[in-house]
Image (tube, rainbow, N blue to C red):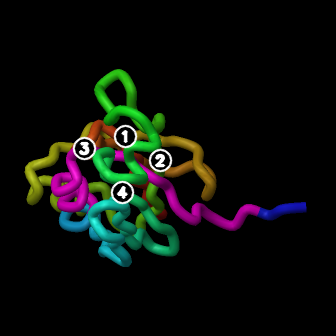
Amino acid sequence: MLTIVGIDHIVLRTDKLNEMLAFYCQVLGCTIERQTDKSLGLTQLRAGNALIDIVDVNSELGRAGGNAPSTSENNLDHFCLQLATISEQQLIEHFKQHNISLPNFERRYGAQGYGQSVYLTDPQGNTVELRSTI
């Protein structure tokens, strides 16, 4: 029997590579762990104990997945990033510094049980849920 212990990685396809890297690195605090050559088109970002792979749709890997995501054809519904303990107000202040306003936090169920979380949208239109244990 298999036992899932966490998310290893997700793969997001994009035609907005620079904006996506800025969002995930500068706003969310990921770091670039590995980049392939431009023709292959893969950048891997460290997100805690998981990776977020960003694939340029104009690269070898990206072309295999079809057209670029659009407002009606996103890569996925959403994914959730578990944050270290941080208050809602601290999160709001952090995103305010990046000119991003957050909607209201809501009580939702996730891998760690019920908790407060908030959704935001990255530059490619993917929905990211942020969740902290408070």
Nearest to the eye among marks 3 and 2: give it.
3
What residue range appears in magenta? 4-24
Can residue 53 be seen by looking at this rendering? yes
Question: Tag 1 or tag 2, which sits nearer the N-term?
Answer: 2
Label 3 environment density (alpha carbons within 10 Å; few <14, some 14–19, many ≥20): many
Q: Which residue is labeled 1 in the image?
A: 127
**Which quadrant holds the C terminus?**
bottom left
- Sequence order check: which comes first, mark 1 or mark 3? 3
Which residue is label 2 attached to? 79
- Residue at 32 percent of width and 45 percent of height: 57
Q: Nearer the viewer, mark 4 or mark 2?
A: 4
Front residue of 65 and 77: 65
For the residues labelled 2 and 1, the Cα–Cα distance comes to 7 Å
Spatial CA span between label 3 and label 4: 10 Å
Q: Are marks 2 and 1 in contact (CB under 8 Å)?
A: yes
Q: Which residue is mark 3?
A: 15
Which sits earlier in the primary sequence, circle 4 or circle 1?
Answer: 4
Asked whether disc 3 touches disc 4, contact meaning CB atoms under 8 Å apart, the reply is no
Q: Is residue 83 left or right of residue 17?
A: right
Task: Return the residue found at the far right.
Answer: 1
- Identify residue type, mark 1: Thr
In the rendered structure, the answer to whether residue 69 lies left or right of residue 4 reads left
Q: Position of residue 39 (x, y in %)?
A: 31, 61
